[in-house]
Image: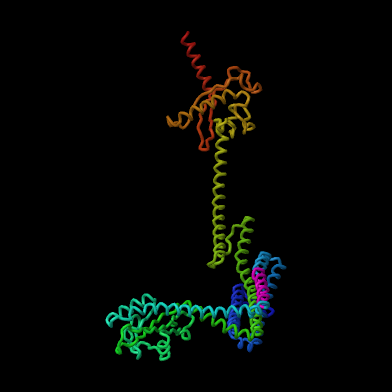
């Protein structure tokens, strides 16, 4: 933080960033509190109606803060664009793209949701919905009654197994009955309400739950009774407390005053899914009846909550779009500026970001690449300087050699030559570079012999390990260019001692010397020796 001469405070980039983050965090916290209050009010219609104005004012305050932040950031962005700062257009495109991504879907969802809520609430409270809920309740009751009747029939059919069973055989018979009926518990009671035998869960109870007097009286009157119990104590989490209780009277076949009828009690649990479904239908029916009485308040509650929530969400999306655009644009701008500098030949060290995301890592990678390019260019410049120096030294050596040097390709095309070759052959070889040696006037025979020697050398090189070949050639005056012929017949023939080798790039190096004077001297000496011997 710095103070300007006019008294204003100048914030650094990092301080402005932290200030923006803190402001966004405060707005986010207020937004979360507002959403929590809206959620609580939506669940409680009375609470919503009582605090609607306060919620609306709070929402407007948060939305106003968001609008101020967005306007401030937009003004800063347009100021950068007007000043022509590098990357301003890129930042504008990124911010606009993210803003549209958040704004347009929010408006679309709001419009569709508003139409759906405003036009569909009335359709929830029609005769078909109420009839469907009534049918659901009836279906649940019918299903439970069917399950109870099925248990009664199975229990009556299985009761004959213990009609004349002895006291010792009764427990085993009760176990078989429990398995046949699929019950949880089977108890044999006396008419006085005393437990004679049991099978299942009641076996481990000291005082099992006895039938009521009403149930026993009903059983004596019609021979059986059934009841569905525990629905009022069950919940929708599947505790499984609901069950069907069936009482069947068992009369002995024999006659005698000592024989008395007994009562068999069968207890079977109702499946938790069926209980949950029945309770869910009942709860939905009760809530439907409650909300049908206050449908106008329900409509106002949902439309108001939808409007406030989506209004906040849209402005929050715009703010996040600007923030994300700034965060994404910063490393991209650094990369764009760095690419522009590299394209202009500036390989100086580039700034980097120390964050942990991929874009920050990309700036570090780009800076490393730029440094490597700088090092590579420095090494290349040094190598090129050495190459140019070596080439200049080599060219100086070749220019001052008395021997002739010609470099040919595999087709006999002249690639380069030195002044010594021009002097020995008396031909302007520099003007013939890029053309075949055989095309030069008077050099066809010489070129043919050189090609033959190279072919023989390449064929024998792998067998004998030779690194060059050497051969002498004689160029006749009749084959040379007439303008270059000399008047002295003894000096019109040129004798060359040539050596050939293959360069690493497969080019052919031909080095030759003019040994005409040596050969002439040898011939003169031999001629003089012959005359002396003849005398």
**Residue drawn at 70 percent across, 67 percent down:** 81
Q: Residue furthest front?
A: 255
Magenta region includes residue 335: no
Left or right: where 248 falls relative to 130 = left
- Number of marks: 0
Residue 43, compared with residue 401, is above or below; it is below
Q: Nearer the viewer, residue 311 or 527?
A: 311
Residue 511, compared with residue 234, is above or below; it is above
Q: Position of residue 227 (x, y in %)?
A: 45, 84
Q: Nearer the viewer, residue 141 or 360?
A: 141
Which region of the structure is painted magenta?
99-117
Left or right: where 93 falls relative to 417 = right
Residue 486, compared with residue 260, is above or below; it is above
Q: Nearer the viewer, residue 200 or 359?
A: 200
Residue 203 visible in this rendered orientation of the protein: no
> Main SS of the magenta segment?
helix
Q: Residue furthest right?
A: 82
Q: Quadrant of residue 291?
A: bottom right
**Residue drawn at 36 percent across, 85 percent down:** 263
Q: Nearer the viewer, residue 533 or 10?
A: 10
Question: Which quadrant is home to the N terminus?
Answer: bottom right
Q: Position of residue 329 (x, y in %)?
A: 62, 66
């Amino acid at each position: 933080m710095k103070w300007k001469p006019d008294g204003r405070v100048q914030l650094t980039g990092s301080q402005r960033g932290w200030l923006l983050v803190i402001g966004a965090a405060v707005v986010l916290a207020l937004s979360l509190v507002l959403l929590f209050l809206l959620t609580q009010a939506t669940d409680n219609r009375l609470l919503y109606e009582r605090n609607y104005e306060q919620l609306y004012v709070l929402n407007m305050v948060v939305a106003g803060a968001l609008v101020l932040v967005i306007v401030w950031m937009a003004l800063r962005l347009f100021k950068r664009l007007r000043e022509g700062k590098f990357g301003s257009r890129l930042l504008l495109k990124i911010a606009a793209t993210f803003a549209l991504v958040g704004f347009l879907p929010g408006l679309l969802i709001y419009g569709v949701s508003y139409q759906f809520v405003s036009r569909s609430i009335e359709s929830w409270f029609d005769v078909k919905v109420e009839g469907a809920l009534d049918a659901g309740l009836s279906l649940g009751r019918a299903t439970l009654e069917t399950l109870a009747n099925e248990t009664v029939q199975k229990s009556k059919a299985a009761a004959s197994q213990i009609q004349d069973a002895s006291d010792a055989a009764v427990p085993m018979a009760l176990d078989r009955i429990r398995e046949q009926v699929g019950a949880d518990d089977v108890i044999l009671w006396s008419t006085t309400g005393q437990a004679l035998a049991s099978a299942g869960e009641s076996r481990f109870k000291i005082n099992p739950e006895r039938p009521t007097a009403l149930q026993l009286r009903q059983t004596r009157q019609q021979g059986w009774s059934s009841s569905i119990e525990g629905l009022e104590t069950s919940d929708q989490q599947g505790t499984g407390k609901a069950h069907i209780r069936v009482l069947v009277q068992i009369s002995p076949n024999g006659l005698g005053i000592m024989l008395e009828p007994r009562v068999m009690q069968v207890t079977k649990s109702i499946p938790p899914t069926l209980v949950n479904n029945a309770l869910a239908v009942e709860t939905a029916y009760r809530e439907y009846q409650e909300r049908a009485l206050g449908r106008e308040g329900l409509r106002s509650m949902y439309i108001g909550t939808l409007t406030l929530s989506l209004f906040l969400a849209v402005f929050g999306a715009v703010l996040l779009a600007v923030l994300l655009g700034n965060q994404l644009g910063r490393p991209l701008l650094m990369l764009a500026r760095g690419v522009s500098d590299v394209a202009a030949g500036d390989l100086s060290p580039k700034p980097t970001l120390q964050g942990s995301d991929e874009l920050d890592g990309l700036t570090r990678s780009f800076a490393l690449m730029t440094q490597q390019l700088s090092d590579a260019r420095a090494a290349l410049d040094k190598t090129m300087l050495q190459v140019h120096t070596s080439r200049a030294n080599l060219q100086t050596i070749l220019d001052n050699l008395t021997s002739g040097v010609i470099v040919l390709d595999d087709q006999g095309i002249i690639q380069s030559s030195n002044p010594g070759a021009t002097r020995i052959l008396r031909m302007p070889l520099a003007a013939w570079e890029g053309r075949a040696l055989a095309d030069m006037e008077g050099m066809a025979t010489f070129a043919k012999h050189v090609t033959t020697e190279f072919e023989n050398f390449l064929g024998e090189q792998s067998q004998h390990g030779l690194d060059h070949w050497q051969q002498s050639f004689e160029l006749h005056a009749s084959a040379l260019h007439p303008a270059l012929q000399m008047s002295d017949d003894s000096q019109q023939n040129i004798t060359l001692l040539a050596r050939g080798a293959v360069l690493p790039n497969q080019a052919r190096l031909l080095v030759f010397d003019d040994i005409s004077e040596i050969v002439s001297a040898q011939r003169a000496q031999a001629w003089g020796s012959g005359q002396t011997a003849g005398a």
